[in-house]
Structures are given as structure tokens and as C-alpha cells.
Amino acid sequence: MATSTSKYAYIDCDPNLCVGCQLCEYMCAFTKTGEYNSYRSRIRTVRVDEVLITAIACRTCENAPCVIVCPRDALTQDTVTGIIDVNAAKCDGCAWCIESCDFGAISINSQTTLAEICDQCKDEPDGPQCVKWCPKEALTLTTPDQRAQKTRRNLITESLNIPQKATDPK
């Protein structure tokens, strides 16, 4: 059963805009580790089929399964932002969090053996670096309500044959 997201903001990818350049991965890794190494990223680009590519990051699920299943209480979720923090002193890299995540948004750092989860660059004054640097603007920090509103707006504009840019609030 798929976990539904909640009221919390998360990084969303529009697969119609994503070209799979992996710049999001490199910027995430550089922001978190100081090196341009996509294996150290907390966001992943995924090829769904021959032409469809998307990026996946933590969806900040309400009552996050990863937090619930952690046997060492190493994961905690901020009640305001939904961001999940990993307590390095408690995490032993058991990967139960990975098994519980329906989105495949958690990884284990091969050097530290700790779980790594997107924290939306909470310490960066200009927010998530993957969103900031995406050359195709495929990534957005959004909430489920904002995404639903955008989907409704897109359906209306498509049905009325209104050019997309005419209704885009940007």
C-alpha cells in the first residue's frame, strides 16, 4: 500500500520537464558533503521508462513509516516542517527505514553507514539547492494542496486550450 503524503512540503519533480541531467544530485551532494559525487546525494534521478525520467526525494509523509519502524529511535520528524532528522549517535545503518519507504527516498552512506534523508537544505538560506539549480525548473518545493491546485489548473487550461504560460503564476 502506498504511503500518502500529508500537509508537509516536499520536493516534487515534473517528469515532463526533467531531462535527467543529474544536476540536482550533484548540487545536493556538494551542499551536504562538499564534493560533486552523485552517490552522496539525497535526491535521485530515476529513469522510469525509455523517455520518462523523474527525481525522487523524501516526501515528508505524515506519520512517516521510516520513523515508525526505526528500532533505535534514530529518526525523528519535525512536527512543523515534516523534515526527518537522523540521529547519528543512534542510527546503526540497519536499513529498516529504507525497506519502509514507499518512495525509495532513503539511502545508507557507505562511508558512515548512517541513513541519509533529504532535509530540504534546511540550513541553507535560499532553500533546497536541487530546486534552485535545476536548469529546466522541473523541481519545486510544494505541498500536496499546492500540487493538487496546479493539477486542477493544468486540466482546466488544457480543456480550454489556453496556453500554459498564460495561467502560470510565475
Image (cartoon, rainbow, N blue to C red):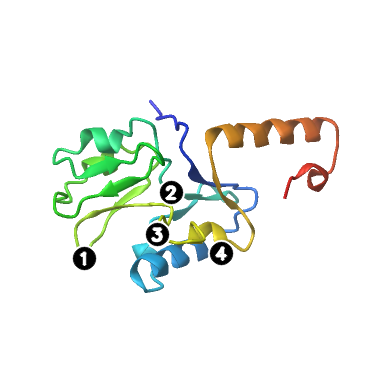
Residue to which mark 1 is pinned = 111
The picture quadrant where one finds residue 121 is: bottom left
Tell me the crowding category of disc 2: few under 14, some 14 to 19, or many 20 or more residues within 10 angstroms, Cα based: many
Disc nearer the start of the sequence (3/4):
3
Q: Disc 2 marks which amino acid?
A: Ala
> Which mark identifies residue 57?
2
Q: Please state which amino acid type lies under the numbered disc 4.
A: Trp
Circle 2 sits in a helix, a strand or a loop, which is it?
Answer: loop
Mark earlier in primary sequence (3, 2): 2
Q: Amino acid at mark 1?
A: Gln
Q: Measure the alpha-carbon separation of dots 1 and 2.
A: 21 Å
Residue sitting nearer the eye, 13 or 10: 10
At x 18% / y 51%, what residue is drawn? 93
In the rendered structure, the answer to whether residue 50 lies left or right of residue 80 reads: right
| Label 4, residues with CA under 10 Å away: few <14, some 14-19, many ≥20 | some
User: Tags 3 and 1 in contact by the CB under 8 Å rule?
Assistant: no
Please name the residue that numbered disc 4 is placed on: 133
Counting from the top left corner in percent of width and height, residue 19 is at 60, 58
Can residue 22 be seen by looking at this rendering?
A: no
Q: Tell me the crowding category of disc 3: few under 14, some 14 to 19, or many 20 or more residues within 10 angstroms, Cα based.
A: few
